[in-house]
Amino acid sequence: MNPGYVKLDLFCRGLRIDKSCELEKDGTPILRTRGGLGSGLEMILPEDVHVNAPVVEHFCLKSPYALHKENGRYVLRKAGDFVFEVTLPKEPKFYSQKASSGKQMSRIGVMQGTYLAIYPTKVCGFWTMKPRQNCRFCSVGLTLGETEELEKTVEEVVETVQAARKEVGITFVHFNTGFYEGTSLDELEPYIRAVKERTGLLIGVQCPPSKSLEKYDRLKELGVNHVSFCLEIFDPRRFKEVCPGKHQYLGQKAYMDAMEYCVDLFGKGKVSGEIIAGLERTESTIEAIEHFASKGIVSNVCVFRPCVGTDLEKENPPRTDDMVPIFMRVYEVCLENNIPIGIAPNILVSIIMLPDEGKYLTERRYLWKRVRLGILKALFRTYFKLKLLRV
C-alpha cells in the first residue's frame, strides 16, 4: 500500500466522500476544465505524491476507498481499514482573484498538482464539425464556455500566471490546445512569448502535430522547454474508433514524425508521447512505451477516466492489476534508455502517474542510474533559480 500504488488504484477505482468531510472548507474545489481529467478531488498522499482522485464518475459509487475526517485530520480508508493520512491542498487565493478584464482567474488557469495548466484558445475543431469528430473520451467541448472561459486573452493569461507564481511558487506552465487545421501552434505563440518574456518560467506545450515541422524550431526559439503529443492510442484500429478526427485529419504517422523531429531538436526527456491506458490492450500500450523510449521519447500515460457527459461515460475504467505492468515499464524503459525524468524542479502532477512514480511499482532499483538522475536534478534546480533571477 505504498503511495504510488494507491494513486494508481484510486485512478482505477475512484473515491467515496464520507459525510464527515468538509471539502468546501478544507480543500481545493473540484474544477472540471480542459480535457476532463481534473474532474476529481486534489489530494496529497505520503511522500508528496499528488493525485486527482475520481469522485463524480459512476464507478466511484462502488469504490472500496473512502475519505474521512477524523479528529481534524483527513484519513484514507479502504474497505474500512486505515490506509494512511492524506492532505487536502487549500484552495489557492488567486482562484478567487480577477484579472484586469474582470474574469475570475480559476476560469483561466488551474493547478493540477504543483503546476499551472491553461487551455487558452477556442474549442477544438473536432467538436464543431458536423457530425462531431472529437475523441470519444474528451470533454473539452463540454467545459469551454461553461466551467472555464471560452477564450482567454494574452494579458489575462499572463496575469494569472504571475498570481500563481507569487502565491504558490509555480515553476511550470503547461499550455494545450485543440485542432485548428494548420494553425494550432500559431494560436499558442502569443501566449508562450508573453509568459516566457515576463516570468521566465518553464513552459510545456501540448498540441496536435504540425505538418510544417519547422514550426517546432520556432517553439524552441521562444524558449519552450517541453513538447508533448496526444497520440492517445497506439493500436491503429482502436485509434480510428476512439479518435475519429485525429485519424481522418492527422493520422498516427504525423504524430510519430513530429515527435521524432522534436527529440532531435529539443533532446531526450523533453518530448512526450501521451497515451491513455485502458482503451486498448495492455500489450499494445507497453509496445508504445517501448517504441517511444527507443527514440528518446518519454511516455506520459494517463488512466482512462469515463468522465461525465463524454461519449464513453458509461464505460468502466481499467483494472489496477492490468495497469501496474504499464507504469512499471514506463519507469524502467526511461532508465534503461538513459532518458532523464523527474529533473525539473517542483513539477508534481496529480492527473497522471509521473514516469518516475513507477519506482513504487517495480522491484528493480537502478541504483546508479537514480544517483545520476539526482545529480542532474540538483544541477538543473540551481541553473533554473539563477535564470529566474535575471527575469
Image (spheres, rainbow, N blue to C red):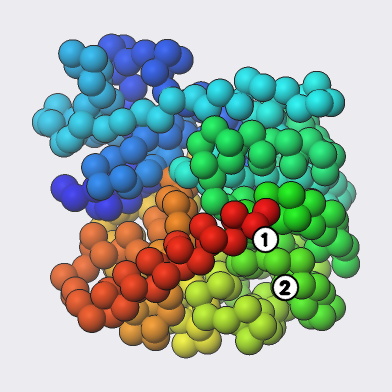
Question: Which residue is tagged 1?
Answer: 205
Identify the amino acid type marked 2: Lys
Say above or below: 208 vs 113.
Answer: below
Relative to 360, 185 lies left or right: right
Query: Is 292 rendered above or below residue 85?
Result: below
Query: Residue at label 2?
Result: 220
Horizontal placement of 84 versus 374: left or right? left
Q: Nearer the viewer, residue 36 or 267?
A: 267
Lower sequence index among marks 1 and 2: 1
Of residues 363 and 285, the one nearer the viewer is: 363
Question: Residue 209: where, in percent of width, then height?
Answer: 74, 71
Say which residue appears at 45% left-offset and 62% top-offset: 381
Label 2 environment density (alpha carbons within 10 Å; few <14, some 14–19, many ≥20): some
Few, some or many C-alpha atoms within 10 Å of disc 1 (few <14, some 14-19, many ≥20)?
A: many
In percent of width and height, residue 122 lies at 82, 44
Position of residue 257 measured from the top left corner of the image (x, y, whole percent): 69, 83
Q: Secondary structure at mark 1?
A: strand
Q: Residue furthest left?
A: 81
Instruction: Please report the residue visible at 23 percent of the width from the left and 60 percent of the height from the top.
Output: 360
Q: Secondary structure at mark 2?
A: helix
- The circle drawn on residue 345 is none
As displayed, is residue 16 above or below residue 19?
below
Q: Is residue 121 visible?
A: yes
Q: Nearer the viewer, residue 338 or 9?
A: 338
Amino acid marked by disc 1:
Val
Q: How far from the left and from the top, in percent, is residue 344?
A: 47, 62
Rendering quarter of residue 290: bottom left
Q: Residue at x 28, y 40 (%)?
A: 45
